Image: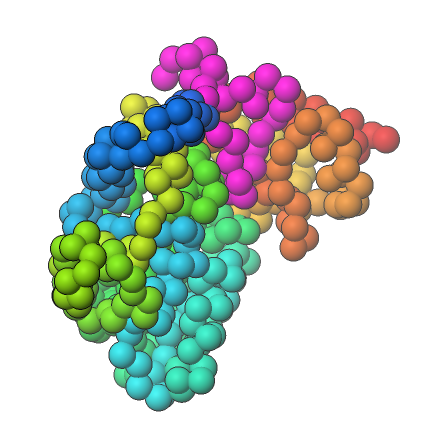
């Protein structure tokens, strides 16, 4: 990686230490340029270049499909992870007494769409996490003959635990259970292969590790199960020949685009495309290696200070998130670090660092220099 060139993509590094990609990422320079270029074009030319806008939308669709090893017709654009998961939750032909299994440490995006099914007689069964880890056996223990869906995060948001998607997916495929993945905490930093891992549905917003804007993400539905999910929301663009407006032919599009019910967020899709291009240039395998090396550096500094590491340190269970605890006044340290331009997350009794590939070991050292300064006050 050409670090000087990479760092130029992230103006935030001039005045900040940004270790908070698990929350909302800063925009790369090229994403800002894509937004500005689109806005200027729309302002100055109106819709004169609309066909070119749509060509870019389809190019970005291909790029997202490539990122997760999906076929292009299996992906759609959604406004966020919650929308993608809700497409699944509201589209299954549930029967009273069915259930869905989720870990008990999920971000609410992967909780409330399933809880919302209670009026339809659907039970949510929680697999118990153990110190931030979700043991495979805890998931399978909650599965019954009425389980229709197992839904997990690829990476758990607080602990950074990386679920074994391949093992869970193989189990679900063997049992005839849908496998759904909230991938927002891994896409952009860890490899994803929906085919290899037997994933039926996947959703992720672009504003974290994917380095794009809020309010636009990707959704995947396997062609194997497409016809089993009824679109709960439809619109003019859900059907074939959508631009033959007055024909009223209610034949749904043959792929995932049937879930794009109306006009899309074209500007944000262009931004998403610029971010995907940047990640593709660096290569996800190289990004993962770089981020895990930074994680090694953080883990070493934590051990030197006898701080308690909450995240798993098992190689197969690690991600871009490192969470830890210590005898620290959390409210005070949040204010102290903010005054020094440090972006990180402190919540639920945990301190969480989430660097990306453009961050440096020097920034890790400066973070802990500030941390030590706080402790000596």
Q: Is residue 359 left or right of residue 283?
A: right
Quarter of the figure with residue 174: bottom left
Quarter of the image with the N terminus is top left
Q: Is residue 8 magenta?
A: yes
Q: Which residue is at the far front? A: 246
Q: Nearer the viewer, residue 133 or 215?
A: 215
Instruction: Identify whether 107 is placed above or below 218.
Output: below
Side (left or right) of 370 relative to 112: right
Q: Is residue 7 above or below residue 82?
A: above
How far across and how far down the image is residue 172, in percent? 25, 67
* Residues shaded magenta: 1-29
Question: Which residue extends farthest right?
Answer: 377
Instruction: Please give left or right for residue 295 compared with residue 307 in the image.
Output: left
Residue in view at x 24 percent, y 50 percent: 75
Look at the image and tell me whether residue 210 can be seen: no
**Split into 4 quadrants, where in the image is the C terminus?**
top right
Residue 219 is a magenta residue:
no
Q: Where residue 280 sits: x, y (%)?
A: 29, 29
Locate residue 228: give its quadrant. bottom left
* Count of marks placed on residues: 0
Residue 123: horizontal and vertical position, in percent?
A: 42, 81
| Residue 67 point in image, percent of width and height | 26, 39
Look at the image and tell me whether residue 158 can be seen.
Answer: yes
- The residue lying at 70 percent from left, 24 percent from top is 369
Query: In the rendered image, which quarter is residue 29 located in?
Result: top left
At 44% from the left and 34% from the top, the residue drawn is: 211
Q: How is the image coloured?
A: rainbow
Relative vertical location of residue 286 with respect to residue 205 in this rendering, above or below: above
Viewer-closest of 75 and 290: 75
Q: Residue at x 35, y 88 (%)?
A: 96
């Amino acid at each position: 990686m050409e670090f000087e060139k990479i760092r130029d993509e992230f103006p935030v590094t001039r005045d900040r230490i940004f270790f908070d990609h698990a929350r909302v990422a800063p925009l790369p320079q090229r994403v800002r340029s894509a937004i500005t270029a689109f806005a200027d074009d729309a302002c100055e030319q109106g819709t004169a270049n609309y066909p070119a806008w749509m060509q870019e939308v389809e190019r970005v669709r291909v790029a997202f499909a490539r990122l997760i090893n999906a076929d292009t017709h299996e992906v759609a654009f959604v406004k966020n992870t919650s929308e993608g998961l809700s497409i699944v939750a509201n589209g299954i032909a549930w029967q009273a007494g069915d259930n869905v299994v989720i870990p008990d440490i999920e971000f609410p995006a992967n909780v409330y769409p399933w809880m919302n099914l209670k009026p339809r007689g659907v039970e949510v069964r929680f697999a118990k996490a153990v110190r931030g880890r979700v043991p495979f056996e805890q998931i399978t223990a909650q599965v019954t003959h009425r389980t229709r869906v197992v839904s997990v995060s690829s990476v758990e948001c607080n602990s950074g635990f990386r679920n074994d998607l391949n093992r869970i997916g193989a189990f679900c495929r063997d049992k005839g259970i849908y496998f759904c993945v909230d991938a927002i905490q891994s896409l952009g930093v860890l490899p994803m292969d929906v085919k290899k891992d037997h994933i039926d549905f996947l959703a992720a917003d672009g504003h974290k590790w994917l380095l794009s804007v809020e309010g636009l993400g990707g959704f995947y539905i396997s062609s194997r199960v497409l016809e089993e999910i009824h679109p709960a929301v439809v619109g003019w663009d859900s059907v074939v020949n959508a631009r033959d407006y007055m024909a009223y032919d209610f034949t749904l599009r043959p792929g995932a685009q049937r879930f794009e019910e109306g006009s899309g967020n074209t500007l944000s899709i262009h931004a998403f495309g610029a971010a995907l291009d940047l990640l593709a240039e660096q290569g996800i395998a190289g990004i993962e290696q770089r981020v895990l090396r930074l994680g090694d550096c953080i883990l070493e500094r934590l051990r030197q200070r006898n701080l308690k590491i909450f995240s798993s340190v098992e190689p197969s269970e690690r991600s871009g998130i490192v969470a830890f605890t210590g005898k620290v006044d959390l409210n005070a340290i949040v204010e102290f670090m903010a005054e020094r331009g440090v972006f990180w997350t402190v919540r639920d009794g945990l301190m969480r660092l989430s660097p990306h590939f453009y961050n440096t070991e020097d920034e890790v050292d400066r973070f802990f220099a500030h941390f030590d300064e706080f402790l000596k006050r």
